Each structure stands twice: as C-alpha cells, then as structure tokens.
Amino acid sequence: MPDNWRGTSLVLLAMLFVSGITLAQKQQSVVINGKAGQASVLQIDGRAYVDLETLAHIANGSLSFKANRIVLTLPTPTLPTDPGDDSGLSKDFMKAGIEEIASLREWASPLANAIQNGYPVTEYWVANYREPAVHGLRLASVAATTDADRSALQLLTNEFEAVRQWSNNLVEAHKSMGAAQYAISASALRDDPLSQKIVTCGRFLAQMLASGSFQDDSTCH
C-alpha cells in the first residue's frame, strides 16, 4: 500500500451501507454476512462509521488502492441450505430442463402436424428439430449437480428417448406409406399409446421442474 494511503487508512471511514451488517448494543461488535469481529465504530450525527481496513478484515474481503480509487471487495454471502432436504432441484438444472422440454415440444409438434396433413417427412427435415433437443439434453446433463437433479435428468432422458422413438416410427411410416392412416383419422395420432405417453410425461416434467422439487411418475419410465 502506498505510504500516503497507509498514513491515512486509520481515519478512512465507510458508512455501513453493506447488506448484512449489524451492530451490537455496545457498538463494538460488527457482524458481516454472519462473520463477527471487533471494530472501532464512530457515531456522528446519528450515523455509524467504521474503518475500511477493519471492515475488509472481518468480512474476509480485500482492500486495495488504485490511483485515486479505493476498492473494497467483499465475498458474496452463501444462503443457508437445509441438509435434510435432498429433493430440491438446482436453479441451473431447472432452467436447462425447462428449455429441454420446450425443445422436445418444438420437435414433436411440427412432426405431428406434417404427418396429419400428409406433408413429406424426411430424416434430414426431422434432424433440424432433433439436434436442438440433443443439445438441450446435453446442457441439462452438465447442469445436474445434485441427487435430485440426476434423478430428474433420468426422467428427462426417458422423455427424450420416447420422442426420438416416436419420431423414428413416423419417419419409417412415411417411407412405407403407413402414415396415411394419420391423415385419414384426426384422432389416430393422438390415440397412439406412445404419443399419449409422451404428452402425459411432458406435462408432468414441466410441472415438476417449475415446482423446484423432484417427483417421480410412472409415465416417464
């Protein structure tokens, strides 16, 4: 630290605007994000002030002096968690999982519409919808960091595999002219057992991911 800054550091005062700081009644104990320490606190016109170096020391932070700037860095507080609750999904996995469900819907819906209307369906055309879902599942796998995440990931993977099997079946049906039945009957595709399984599991997964807690359902197995 430069001498000119060090010589004045003991009289540098910071208003206690930092979240998580409280003062004891004796105005000697300072608590920052759950970390306590002793500090010389001054009361001036009803406002409390504390030395910057002391503040950084208590918070396990750092204080630096750069040109005409004083930089105080405090660590981000960690929110407490309940060690007995292992059903919670992590925020990153919830986000990735919800995006994957959307990708699966964007894969299945155009395919169903094409089959029902007799439009040509090729492997190349289907791949444009399948690849984003493959990528989304990979991102969800990376985001799965807790036991609850990994359990939910297995259900999400099962749903992906069901959509892929259903998609492959429809592509093959189109090749063999077997897809005509879906164009003739509006309910043929909807009543298909695999199609019903996909829809039911997809709704369940969307609700589970939004809730933030892992749950199981037989339709996703």
Image: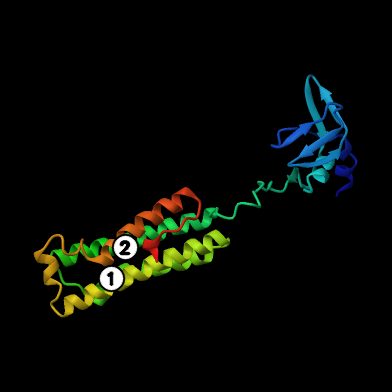
* CB under 8 Å between discs 1 and 2: yes
Q: Look at 39% across and 62% down and name the residue there.
A: 218
User: Which picture quadrant has residue 126?
Assistant: bottom left
Q: Is residue 145 above or below residue 56?
A: below
- Residue designated by label 2: 198
User: Which picture quadrant has residue 47?
Assistant: top right
- Residue designated by label 1: 166
Q: Is residue 205 above or below residue 58?
A: below
Q: Is residue 192 above or below residue 54?
A: below
Residue 72 horizontal side relative to residue 87, left or right = right
Q: Quadrant of the C terminus?
A: bottom left
* Kind of element beneath mark 1: helix
The amino acid pointed to by label 2 is Ile
Q: Is residue 160 visible?
A: yes
Relative depth, front residue between 155 and 129: 155
**Residue 55 location (% of width, % of height):** 81, 40
The amino acid pointed to by label 1 is Trp
Which of the two labelled residues, at mark 1 and mark 2, occupies the earlier sequence position? 1
Residue 130 horizontal side relative to residue 111, left or right = right
Q: Look at 75% across and 32% down and name the residue there.
A: 16
- Give the crowd class for mark 2: few <14, some 14-19, many >=20 residues within 10 Å: many
**Residue 12 location (% of width, % of height):** 83, 35
**Residue 143 location (% of width, % of height):** 53, 62
* Kind of element beneath mark 2: helix
Relative depth, front residue between 51 and 94: 94
User: Which picture quadrant has residue 13?
Assistant: top right
